[in-house]
Image (tube, rainbow, N blue to C red):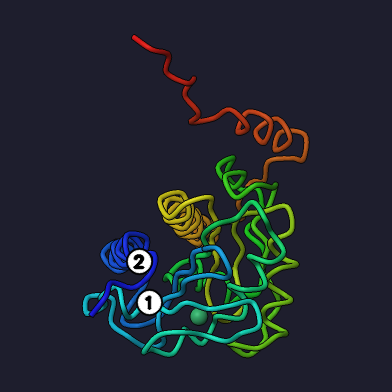
């Protein structure tokens, strides 16, 4: 059997999917991962344990919703496609039903500016998209809107989405959002969290433009 196209990328996706399980972002077969490639995107298959995945199980999809390969794509392929169509700078879409992000998503509210790190998702809040049935065009529309100007959002009564320019960044952002959700949930148990105002969040967002970016290494 010949190796499928993008074999290296498929292996990297499986590694990231396993890291999602190991880190507790996903339980069982919930969650999925998509990566842009020429002519469409690769997405994890529907309902398969990440531990059992091999490169040939990752599904190649085209913009028209057709797919190639021996597996069926994740039931959430539609928002992967629509987000990648709407956001040319995004390469990776990660979706999880992680515990705390989903707990907050079940309250149907945004994560407000209770901590400066909320800006890590790109804005002064992390929005919660309204509920729609999984796999539907309506959910996809809500997700794209909630992600406007952001790289992460919650999905009401469902979970979260994190985006990135590569697998590593998307995974890191998803873990950051999950930590923030856990902190916000705890703060809500203890009282009324104090929120940072818009001018402070604007300052933080400005600082984040250079945060974590080391200057390019020069020779020697
Ligand atoms: Zn889901």
Residue pointed to by mark 1: 58
Q: Is residue 54 left or right of residue 217?
A: left
Whichever of labels 2 and 1 marks the residue nearer the N terminus, that label is 2
| Contact flag, marks 2 and 1 (Cβ < 8 Å) | yes
Residue lying at 64% horizontally and 46% vertically, measured from the top left: 194
Location of residue 99 with respect to 30 vertically, above or below:
above
Distance, label 2 to label 1, CA atoms, is 6 Å
> How many marks do you count on the picture?
2
Location of residue 214 with respect to 175 vertically, above or below:
above
User: In the rendered image, which quarter contains the C terminus?
Assistant: top left
On the image, which quarter does residue 191 sit in? bottom right
Residue pointed to by mark 2: 10
Residue lying at 64% horizontally and 51% vertically, measured from the top left: 89
Q: Is mark 1 within 8 Å of ligand 1?
A: no
Q: Position of residue 206 (x, y in %)?
A: 69, 30
Say few, some or many: other residues with alpha carbon within 10 Å of mark 2 (under 14 / 14 to 19 / 20 or more). many
Location of residue 104 with respect to 198 vertically, above or below:
below
Q: Considering the numbered disc 2 on the image, is that residue within a helix, a strand or a loop?
A: helix
Decide which of 184, 159 is in the foreground and name it.
159
Q: Is mark 2 within 8 Å of ligand 1?
A: no
Q: Position of residue 176 (x, y in %)?
A: 46, 51
On the image, which quarter does residue 126 sit in? bottom right
Q: Is residue 16 left or right of residue 214?
A: left
Q: Is residue 153 left or right of residue 184?
A: right
Residue lying at 67% horizontally and 63% vertically, measured from the top left: 110
Q: Position of residue 79 (x, y in %)?
A: 62, 76
Residue with the most extreme top position: 220
Decide which of 94, 81 is in the foreground and name it.
81
Say few, some or many: other residues with alpha carbon within 10 Å of mark 1 (under 14 / 14 to 19 / 20 or more). many
């Amino acid at each position: 059997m010949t190796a499928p196209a993008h074999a290296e990328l498929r292996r990297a996706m499986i590694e990231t999917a396993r890291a999602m399980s190991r880190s507790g972002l996903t339980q069982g077969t919930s969650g999925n991962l998509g990566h842009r490639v020429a002519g469409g995107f690769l997405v994890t298959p529907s309902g398969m344990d990440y531990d059992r995945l091999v490169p040939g199980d990752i599904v190649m999809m085209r913009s028209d919703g057709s797919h190639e390969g021996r597996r069926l794509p994740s039931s959430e392929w539609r928002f992967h496609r629509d987000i990648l169509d709407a956001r040319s700078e995004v390469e990776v879409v990660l979706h999880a039903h992680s515990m705390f992000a989903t707990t907050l998503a079940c309250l149907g509210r945004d994560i407000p500016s209770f901590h400066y790190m909320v800006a890590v998702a790109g804005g002064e809040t992390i929005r919660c998209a309204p509920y729609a049935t999984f796999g539907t065009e309506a959910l996809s529309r809500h997700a794209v809107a909630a992600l406007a100007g952001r790289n992460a959002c919650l999905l009401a009564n469902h979970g979260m989405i994190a985006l990135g320019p590569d697998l590593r960044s998307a995974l890191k952002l998803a873990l950051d959002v999950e930590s923030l959700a856990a902190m916000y949930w705890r703060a809500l148990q203890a009282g009324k969290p104090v929120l940072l105002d818009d001018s402070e969040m604007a300052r933080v967002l400005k600082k984040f433009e250079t945060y974590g970016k080391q200057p390019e290494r020069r020779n020697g």
